[in-house]
Amino acid sequence: MNNIQPSSYEMIYAIVDHGHASKFLHKAMDYGIRGGTILYGKGTVSNPILNFLSLYDEEKEIILMGAESGVAKEAMQKLNDHFKLHKPGRGIAFSTGLDLVRGSTLCERDDIKKEEATSMYKLIITIVNRGKAEDVIDAAKEKGARGGTIMNARGSGVNENFKVFNMDIEPEKEMVLVIVKEDIFSDIVSNIEQKLELSEPGNGIIFVQDLKRVYGIYEDKK
């Protein structure tokens, strides 16, 4: 069992229109990524100031790919160029550092130099009971978020539960991803925690990750 040293690996998230994930993943593998997992979700946006998904309430596919930091950096740059993520409506891609990787055969090395986060964005992940995801989005918007992605296990082809911080993620749970600037994430997290009563057992969990690289996020210049 390999334990990869902190931040030597990254988790790449890509969010694309329904039906495009397989093509995206295959191209990523051409650029050095060893493989990935495709999940299904829904994008929600109501304000173009920070156009998270570039489309309103659309079915989305989310690709999760783990890679060594150097590979992730190069692959994301090439994916951005190939799929033109710099243009609205083409999808987004971002990555976070991984503190621990177990059970992976992706790499035998553990001496890769640590890299610091290079973006000004945070990823807020909230896991709640099914039917509460829209409440998370609403609470985030109240404090400045412009949209997010809702994921659940329906149609994902996953036959077993997985855990985040020892909490079972079952078909009855929904996961909400929201990308925000670092100067407002604290207010958003506090509002979600309050509105969803996350301090009460069984209501859900919330955690935040630094984003290392971000492609496809847009802000209006006014």
Image (tube, helix red, strand yellow):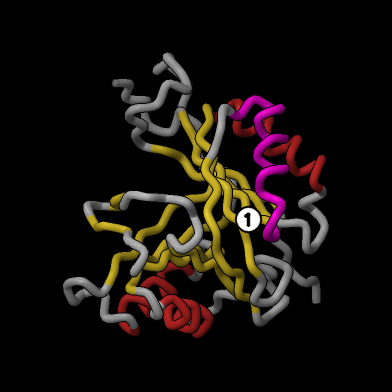
| Label tally | 1
Instruction: Tell me the crowding category of disc 1: few under 14, some 14 to 19, or many 20 or more residues within 10 angstroms, Cα based.
Output: many
Relative placement, left or right, of 137 versus 45 is left
Quadrant of image for the C terminus: bottom right
Q: Name the spot of residue 35 as percent of width and height, x first.
A: 56, 32
Judging by the rendered image, the residue that carries numbered circle 1 is 15
Q: Residue at x 39, y 71 (%)?
A: 189
Q: Residue at x 28, y 69 (%)?
A: 204
Q: Residue at x 48, y 64 (%)?
A: 151
Relative placement, left or right, of 123 versus 16 is left
Place residue 132 in its image quadrant.
bottom left
Q: Name the spot of residue 197 as percent of width and height, x first.
A: 26, 81
Residue in the foreground of this view, choosing between 210 and 4: 4
On whether residue 13 falls in the magenta region, the answer is no
Quadrant of image for the N terminus: top left
Secondary-structure class at tag 1: strand
Q: Which residues are magenta?
A: 17-33
Relative placement, left or right, of 173 versus 83 is left
Q: Eyeballing the image, is 120 above or below 2? A: below
Residue in the foreground of this view, choosing between 123 and 168: 168
Relative placement, left or right, of 103 versus 211 is left
Q: Eyeballing the image, is 222 above or below 176? A: below
> Farthest left residue?
201
Disc 1 marks a residue whose amino acid type is Ile
Q: Residue at x 34, y 84 (%)?
A: 195
Q: Name the spot of residue 68 as percent of width and height, x first.
A: 52, 27
Place residue 74 in its image quadrant.
top right
Q: Name the spot of residue 99 as percent of width and height, x first.
A: 36, 37
